[in-house]
Amino acid sequence: MPKIIILTSGLSCTGKTTWRNALVAELTKNSISVITANADELTIRYCQEKNRNESTQLSYSDMFSPLHQAGCVQATQKQFAEIIQQSNDDVIILDRTHLSSAFRQELIQQFDEENVVVVYFNIADEAAWRARLSERNINAAMQPDPAQRVIIRDDVIAKQKERLQVPSISEGMSKLVQICCCSDASWDDQLKTVVSELVEHIQLNLDNQQQVRRMK
């Protein structure tokens, strides 16, 4: 089992995976082992396998239709659980929306609460976020592989907004960090600051865990 768990939380296209990649690079630079599990990547993989096995041309968006959603959710949940159970890394980053308080608390309770960090991506500038979402969808539509056309439809966003419950420290995590989705310049500054602060927090936590083990 990993020693520190990081959960991302927030609507689609708020910068979760971009931030995750920056954190992974910085952790690796500091010789801290890390593994990630990303909901979009696992959904794409499930869709690709389905297309190969059944000779279909289903797209990423099809995985959220009534016909395919239950199977896709079950498969990705299983892969998330396997990654968590099999990991011996210092850090695992669970990169998905984690919108509901109940879902986050269910996950947090599986681990030592003192070692769980939640990073919430808040939308501070609706127009900037909408523009980023539109650009992402345009680029995704150009992918030759339909499974990789990660287009987030308006109805999916609407459902996400209905389910979204802003994380609270009362849910049991040891640390809650908020990043605001806004203009690119401000976003870059936040990204660097939060990554730096979290690496420091993680290193201190790992040092404390090692000291406790030595005392036993």
Image (spheres, helix red, strand yellow):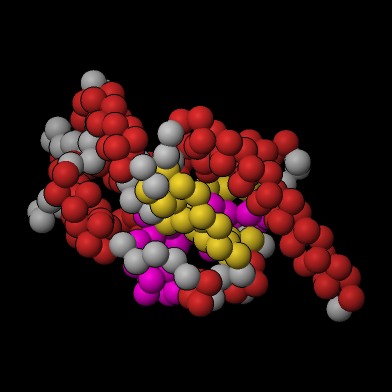
Horizontal side of residue 138 vs 188, given as left or right: left
Q: Position of residue 195 (x, y in %)?
A: 63, 44
Residue 194 lies, with reference to residue 3, above or below; the image says: above
161 and 8: which one is in front?
161
* Quarter residue 150 falls in: top left
Residue 201 lies, with reference to residue 110, above or below; the image says: above
Q: Is residue 72 magenta?
A: no
Q: Is residue 92 visible?
A: yes
The residue at the point 36 percent across, 42 percent down is: 125
25 and 186: which one is in front?
186
190 and 204: which one is in front?
190
Placement of the C terminus among the 4 image quadrants: bottom right
Q: Is residue 89 visible?
A: no
Q: Residue furthest right?
A: 215
* Quarter residue 57 falls in: top left
The residue at the point 74 percent across, 51 percent down is: 200
Horizontal side of residue 168 vs 63, given as left or right: right
The residue at the point 81 percent across, 60 percent down is: 207
Q: Position of residue 133 (x, y in %)?
A: 29, 35
Residue 106 lies, with reference to residue 119, above or below; the image says: below
The residue at the point 75 percent across, 41 percent down is: 30
Q: Position of residue 73 (x, y in %)?
A: 27, 58
- The region drawn magenta spans 80-106
Q: Position of residue 26 (x, y in %)?
A: 67, 38
190 and 24: which one is in front?
190
Q: How many marks?
A: 0
Horizontal side of residue 175 vs 65, given as left or right: right
Placement of the N terminus among the 4 image quadrants: bottom right
Residue 146 lies, with reference to residue 167, above or below; the image says: above
Q: Residue furthest left?
A: 67
